Amino acid sequence: MFNTKYGPFDGKTWEDLCQMIFKRKYEKESYQKIPASPGDFGLEGFTLSSGLAFQCYCPEKHYDRKELYEKQRDKITADLNKLKDYEEDIAARLGETKICKWIFVTPEFDKNELIKHARKKEEEIRGWKLGCLTDDFTVLLYDADDYALEIRDFQTALGEVMYFSDILPLVELNEPKEVYEKNIVRKNKLRLKEFENKDSYERKLAKLNDFNIDQFLSCDPYLKSIEAASPTFYMKLLRVITEFESTIKEETITWFGDPQDLTEKLRKLFIERIINDLKPNSNITMAAKISEKMFARWLAVCELDYDC
């Protein structure tokens, strides 16, 4: 899945959304979808009256900037080359229409080099003198923001939750395991401070440390298993997790009571957030399990601290 501020997408969901947008936005220009079978010829669709052609592309996952550019560049190159390879097939579907603009629609792009590549291909294709293209044939790059109003309209009509910010990644685990274990032990001592002078203190502390360390070590593999089983659900869960971290940061700064009381308060809020935001695909059992693992992770990486 490729996450955006409009929600997560894969190739199919992005194309489905784009087709709905094209059909509505370009209805008066006689938009015509091109079915994928026997082939789309490098085109998702076109407008009969204005000569606009569209091709959609959504990355399979998040890449670094260089790799994303390369994926998008190669996709543009391959699909534009199809204009020449399938000239007769395309012309038969266009009729008297000629393509004046070929528009590459992708959730996002962030390298100027992609625009440079578009200009290069544009000049190359003009030199082919294809009968189905105008002499001033142009390659344009659009991202999700170019259709922001249409995307929001469809999300509202379908009753989908609307997002207005990107999902932040989890804090990376770059330290040795021992560093995270020490963080957990230090914070658990504060959580059990009321037991400090009791005979059961060391036993309770050891058990709590073992439990939290085990939950911490199993957290990321557990989240990866969710992602593998249901990428869409995982992205929604990740949004809940990362946005709840803001709540944790504020509460730890302003809290003046017992650390364990703060932990329990936050845990209850987090479980409620999971159940409410992810329904009907969540329940108390799932939410409690996610909460146990995430709170152990937050203790380990110092998202949840009591010494602020």
Image: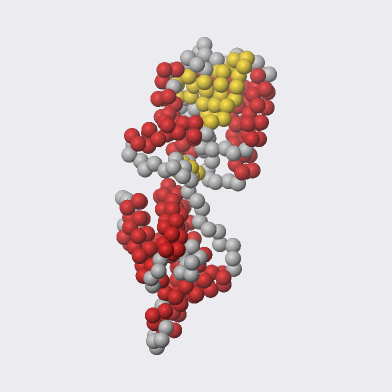
Farthest residue, direction top: 96
Q: Position of residue 294 (x, y in %)?
A: 44, 62
- In terms of image quadrants, where is residue 19? top left
Comparing 53 with 192, the one in front is 192
Can the viewer see residue 29 in this picture? Answer: yes
In the picture shown, does residue 175 fall above or below 209?
Answer: above
- Does 104 sit left or right of 13 as displayed? right
Q: Residue at x 48, y 48 (%)?
A: 167
- In terms of image quadrants, where is residue 259? bottom left
Comparing 173 with 247, the one in front is 247
Q: Residue at x 33, y 34 (%)?
A: 157
Comparing 40 with 18, the one in front is 18
Farthest residue, direction bottom: 199
Q: Position of residue 197 (x, y in %)?
A: 41, 86
In the picture shown, does residue 265 fall above or below 280?
Answer: below
Q: Position of residue 49 (x, y in %)?
A: 47, 14
Q: Residue at x 46, y 36 (%)?
A: 14
- Does 96 sit left or right of 157 as displayed? right
Can the viewer see residue 294 in this picture? Answer: no
